[in-house]
Amino acid sequence: MSTILEKISAAVFAGDSEKTESLVQKGLDENVSVKEILDNGLVLGMGEVGARFKRGEMFVPEVLMSAEAMHTGLELLRPLLAESNIDRSGKIMLATVKGDLHDIGKNLVGMMCEGEGFEVVDLGFNVGPDVIVEKIKEHQPDIVGLSAMLTTTMRAMGHTIKAIEEAGLRDKVKVIVGGAPVDKEFADRIGADGYGSNAVAGPELARQLLGK
Amino acid sequence: MRTNYRVNSGVRFRMLSDDQLQELVDGVLHVLEYTGLDVYHEESRDILKKAGAWVDGIRVRIPSHLVRKSLDLAPRSFTVFSRDGNPKNNINIGPGRAHFGPGPTCPNFIDVESMERRPYVKSDVPLVAKVVDALPNIDFCESLGTVNDVHHELGATYEFAGMFPNTSKPIVAWSYDYDDSVDIHKIAVAEAGGQEAFERRPNYIHYCEPLSPLVSTEDALNKLVFAAKHRIPLIFTPCPIAGGTAPVTAAGIITQAAAESWMGLTIAQALQPGLPFIMGGVLSVMDMSSMILAYGAPELSLFMAGLTELAHYVGLPLWQTGGCTDSKTLDEQAAIEGSLSVYFSALSGGDLCHDVGYTESAMTGSVFQLAMMDESIGYARRITRGIEVNEETLAVEVIDNVGPNGHFLREQHTRDHYRTEFWYPNLCDRRNYEEWEMMGSTPMRDRVVARVHDILATHEPSPIKPETEKVIEEVLAAAEDRVREK
């Protein structure tokens, strides 16, 4: 029983999507519990990846491969997770703020979050505060993640948070920010709930804020 | 199919034209033929005379045809082998290859615990060798010091005995004279499995230093003759100082240094045709206010680049110099002088670049400077490795796949190449501010010190054979007996 979980964990760690998928299926066929597969297989493997990334022993392309492998495994588990009433995920809405066409960093955060089981709603780039407010009402996310690449557009993050406040939605969502020119001091100044310095930090930050 | 396609794959530079290099060669030949050198060694004078040189008392002049013949006999490419058979630690000398290592004989050392400057002692030797063994961009070993706490004739013997078990990277062995050269050779030969086995796969290089201007000293030639007879790869490296013991001009000091080194070459090739010979030396300026030989001077790098081009023009490998500083401590001056000379040395493609880890104008050896320069050498090596151009690296298909506003992080192409295309620092910090703060807000200096302490606490060099350990004990005991009455 333990070996299949170890293998799943190892496949996620190795970033092998195909192997992860077939092993998760095998685990389910062998009646290993969904919770076991998730906690002691997928999450364990991804946890090791995160720890090594932090120590500078793994690099972004490998982390992305592992995130993809985890995502593949999770897709198999998702219907069963709902049945078993295991709620691990939260909903994250992502957008690059108004005036900024930089998409990549935000997409990476999305991939990492999906990989770790979050539901991701991506609004794309150059998204104005009014659109973000509307979409919060529509999707009711737990977290709104704002991205900006330029010192000229990072101010729009502040404007967006203000618009969310004015719409009376500020206590309904956590707002996190990131992007090349952003640092913690700026995040605090504009009243964000959290700041991530890179894509890999995204899901960890989300989990902290949601207490998961 | 490509045809008649020319590849330049590394960043290299060349300063002097063929015409200029030929003029330098002619200058060297002129000095050797018409001025000559004083040779304080009877056996060498006899060897030279037999080979066709003109001997007048101690003054020896060499006709240019004899020098040319000697240049032809010496190989441009050869291998110095690791003592334990690890091919990663072999040094393959040849065109387009630059190797790095420390230098010998500093009187002082930066204590690895107190960080204070004090006389170099016997117990420092294994530490230096261990650090050399662990650092990925350091290729050969010297001790960074003269052992002060043993009999004054046995420093080099203890030095080699302390280095040899603690690194399998080839050692460049400095010695005082004949007797300690014999001690060193006994140890190396024991590990190689006898003299014949050593000649097939030499595991160290012998280092001799003549005197500038234009003197081949008795001890330097005692050592040279011993090395040549035993087919030990040989460095013959003068240390002229521009404006003091050599002409003040770059071309002048290069000409004189080459003449001094080629005297050694001629003797060595007459004794042992085809002996691997590495041309020296260390060329720099006399600082006209402090009178030191400046190890951090831009002229050092420039003179050494000129000397390298001359050596390669005549088909010899060169004993390069870099990674050294006049600074007294591990500071910004040490980083600037060390890094620039390392980079310049790598660009010129000098074959063995020594004195990495010298501080205070060669007065004080420092493993901290050595460890910091390991990072600079890695950096320089990534640049000199250059740009590879082919269908795979052009990535036209990958660019097409990703298209506008996509990203490359998920591409197999990225995964296949990011580890080899990029250089990853060991000491330079690229973290964001918060993470850097979380890790203790360390400056470079602290990270260098931590790396050295980590190596000393954890690194295990590959062991020498038990029989070699016994030979080392015997050699040291016999050496102590030899000097008892002195």
Image (tube, rainbow, N blue to C red):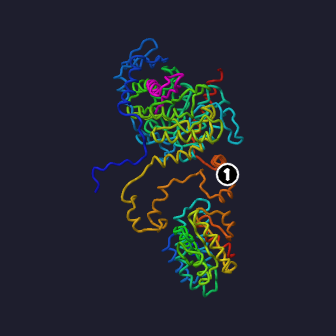
> Quarter-wise, where is residue B36 in the image?
top left
Q: Secondary structure at mark 1?
A: loop
> Residue B62: x percent and y percent?
39, 19
Query: What is the quadrant of the C terminus of chain A in the image?
Result: bottom right
Q: Residue at x 66, y 29 (%)?
A: B150
> Residue B79: x percent and y percent?
44, 40
Against B354, residue A155 (above or below) is below
- In the shown orientation, is residue B422 left or right of residue A170? left
| Residue B247 is inside the magenta segment | yes
Query: What is the quadrant of the N terminus of chain A in the image?
Result: bottom right
Q: Residue at x 68, y 57 (%)?
A: B437
Against B76, residue A150 (above or below) is below
> Residue A180: x percent and y percent?
58, 62
Which three-letter amino acid code belongs to the residue tagged 1?
Answer: Thr
Residues rendered magenta in the picture: B233-259
Against A144, residue B301 (above or below) is above
* Residue A3 visible, this orientation: no
Q: Residue at x 47, y 18 (%)?
A: B39
Against B66, residue B11 (above or below) is below
Q: Nearer the viewer, residue B465 or B51?
A: B51
Residue at mark 1: chain: B
| Residue B197 is inside the magenta segment | no
* Residue B223 visible, this orientation: yes
Q: Residues within 10 Å of mark 1 (few under 14, many from 20)?
A: few
Name the residue beneath numbered marker 1. Answer: B442
Q: Nearer the viewer, residue B32 or B224?
A: B32
- In the shown orientation, is residue B298 left or right of residue B263? right
Q: Residue furthest bottom?
A: A83
> Residue B314: x percent and y percent?
38, 32
